[in-house]
Amino acid sequence: MQQFAKFIYFKLLGWSINGNFPSHLKKCVFIVVPHTSWWDFLLGLLIREVWNEEINYIGKKSLFDSPFGWFFRWMGGAPIDRSKKSDTVKVIAKLFKERDKLRLALSPEGTRRKVEKWKTGFYFIAKTADVPIVLVAFDYGKKEIKIAKPLMPTENQEADFKLYRSFFDGVEGKVESI
């Protein structure tokens, strides 16, 4: 399956990779930016196969209902009920404590639209679970996935976010034609 994924990713689609997957990490939070299209999910599944690595994700609860819920779970997803008033950060941080391996991919935008301000949940999940954050850019302009070295969140959220955002400068998301 990995060879087939590599053929599609590199030869058919003509994409490249800039950086190395941190396979030594058993637990981390990946933030994938920008998240502007449903194609990002398919690209994420494809690059996961290229790397031959287990990467998990969460999604809104309705995605995991019939008829396709089984597929999203099988692909490493877990539903999040955003209608309930629960402490999602603590719930996910607890998952990190309970599992031997959890590499969680999140979109800090929290939606598939371009946003000016990111949600901060990924940051507090990583801090609470004491796991690094790995920055991943899906750059449709360059047809490149760019991956940074793991970074531990510090006590200076403002400086951390400035560093994170600078990694994504110039990255182009997929623009959907209407």
Image (cartoon, grey):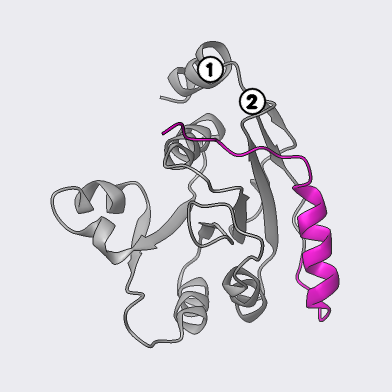
**Quarter of the image where the C terminus is located:** top left
**At label 2, which amino acid type do we have?**
Lys
Residue at x-position 76% and y-position 71%: 153
From the viewer's perspective, tell me whether residue 111 is left or right of residue 74: right
The residue beneath circle 1 is 13
Relative to 31, does residue 129 appear above or below in the rendering? below
Front-most of residues 129 and 135: 135
Magenta-span inclusion, residue 169: yes
**Quarter of the image where the N terminus is located:** top left
From the viewer's perspective, tell me whether residue 110 is left or right of residue 120: left
> Cα distance, mark 1 to mark 2?
8 Å
Relative to 91, does residue 172 appear above or below in the rendering? above
Relative to 153, does residue 141 appear above or below in the rendering? above
Q: Quadrant of residue 157?
A: bottom right
Q: Which residues are magenta?
A: 152-178
Question: How far from the left and from the top, in percent, is residue 87?
Answer: 46, 86
The residue beneath circle 2 is 143
Relative to 145, does residue 131 appear above or below in the rendering? below
Residue that extends furthest to the left in the rendered view of this protein: 67
Residue at x-position 61% and y-position 55%: 30
Residue that extends furthest to the top in the rendered view of this protein: 11
Element under label 1?
Answer: loop
